[in-house]
Image (cartoon, grey):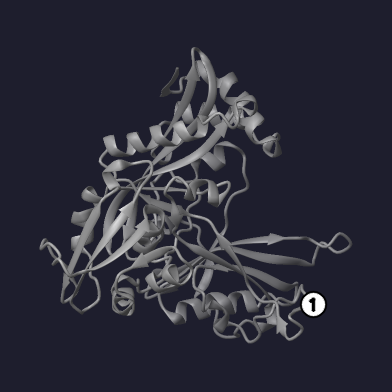
Amino acid sequence: MMSFRRLEPKDCDAFCRVSKSAYPGFADFPIEKLFKHRMDHPDDFDTELFGAFEDDKLLGSWRTHDFTMTFRGQNLPVLGLGGVAVDLPFKKQKVCLQMVEQFHRQALEQGRAMTLLYPFRASFYQAMGYGMASHLYRHTVRVTDLPAGDKSSCGWIEDREEWLAYFNTYASRTHGMIRRPQNFGHLAQALGFPKRNYVGVWRDGSLHGAMELAATDFAEQNPFRYHFTVKELLADEPCDLHALLAFLRAQEDQTQTVVLHSFDPDFGLAFQDHSDPTHEDTILEEFHIGESKGYGLMARVVDCEALLPTLKACRWGRESFELVFELHDSLLTRNHRSLDVVVEEGRWTDRAASSGAARIRMDIAEFSSLLMGASSLRALHRYGRLSTTDEALLPLADRAFAVETPPECWTVF
C-alpha cells in the first residue's frame, strides 16, 4: 500500500538515490545540497518536498510551489508541480500517476483551482488532463540585423530589489506570468550557480525594460569572440524594446550572433532578417529556416467550480453569446460535467444557458489550454480535439476567449 508524506532531513540519502536513478543525466547536479537547502529554507519560493513510500522505502518524490499567476487580468493562486522522480525499478507501476493524483488532492485541499507544471514529456501529462499553456520562440540572428539606435538609457541592473520590483510589476499585468518572491534566486546562489546578469532600460528615473544577458560559446582560438544569449526579455513600450535591442546591436565588434527568446510569435518583425544564420539549408527548397518553437508550461483546471469566480471577473470580449462546455475528465470526476457559459456584453453571468445553446465537447486538457489562451476553439475543432453542435458559433467564441497577448511565463520551476 503506497503512502505519502512530506520529506524530512532523514530522507536525504533516499531522495538523492531516487533523483539520480530517475535522471542519470543530472548525475553531476548538487542534489544533496539542493535537498538540504530545501529543508533549511522551506519558505524559499514557497516550496515543499514530498515522497511516495511503500513501507519505509521511498519510491518517488515531487515538490510543490505555491504561486500567484496573472490570469486574464486577475490574481489566481495556483499550485506548481516540479521535481517528479520515480526510482528506476518502480517505473511503469503507476507510481507517478499516484503521485500526481496526490498532488491534485493537495491542490484541492489548498483551494487551488488550477495547477501548473513543466513536463518531461508533454503527452504523458496531457493524458492526465494538462494542456499547453505557453509557446516559446527562439531566434538566432546576426547582431547587425538588430535595429541600431540610442542605447544611452541602458545599463546593468545593480539593485536586485529594483529588478525584482520591476519584474513583479510587469508580471502583475501580463497574462501567464508568475510573481517572484523576495528570496527568488537564493537557491541558485546556494548551489553555486553563476550570477544572473540583467541589462535594464530606464525612463524618467524608473526601470521600464530588462533582459537577462549571458556571453556564451567562446571561440576556442579567440576568447574575444563569443555569442550573446538573452534568456528573459521584458519591455513596457516599443521604445524600451528598441533600446535593449540597440544595446545588443552595439556589441557587433565582438559578437556576430545573438540568441533571443520571446513568447510573441511576431517577434521576428523586430529584425531586418529573421532567418537563422547558423542554418544554410532550406525547407522545401525555398523556405529559409527561422525561429524554433518550444513547448513548455502546461496548465490544468482541477476545480471548475472554484475557478468560476475568477472567470466571471474576467472580460470576455464585448459581445453576448451562450454555449455549454461538456467536459471530460478521467482523473477528477468533479470536472466531468457540463459548464454553462452565458456572456452578456463581455461579462460571464450566473444565468444558465438555454436548452438550445450550442454544446462543445472537449477534454479538460484542451479546456485548460483554451482558458490560458494557448489554443483556439477553431484550431481545436479543425484537428479533432473537440466536437460541437454549432460550428458557426466558434469564430465569435474564439474572439471572446482570445487573450490580448500570448501567455508569457519566464519562471521555470
In terms of image quadrants, where is residue 41? Answer: top left
Q: Which residue is at a point 18% across and 77% down the rendered structure image? A: 320
Q: Is residue 167 left or right of residue 113?
A: right
Q: Position of residue 62 (x, y in %)?
A: 48, 33
Residue type at mark 1 is Asp
Q: Residue furthest top?
A: 55
Q: Which residue is at a point 36% across and 38% down the rendered structure image? A: 104
- What residue did someone put label 1 on? 281
Q: Position of residue 70 (x, y in %)?
A: 33, 59
Q: Position of residue 207 (x, y in %)?
A: 41, 68
58 in relation to 105, above or below = above
Mark yes or no: residue 174 visible: no
Total number of numbered discs in the rendering: 1
Q: How crowded is mark 1: few (under 14 residues within 10 Å), some or many (20 or more)?
A: few
Q: Which residue is at a point 66% across and 85% down the rendered structure image? A: 273
109 in relation to 193, above or below = above
Mark yes or no: residue 347 visible: yes
In terms of image quadrants, where is residue 216? Answer: bottom right
Q: Which residue is at a point 48% across and 31% down the rendered structure image? A: 38
Mark 1, secondary structure of its residue: loop
Q: Position of residue 186 (x, y in %)?
A: 49, 41
> In what quadrant of the picture does the N terminus appear?
top left
Q: Please state which of residues 263 and 204 is positioned toward the viewer in this rendering.
A: 263
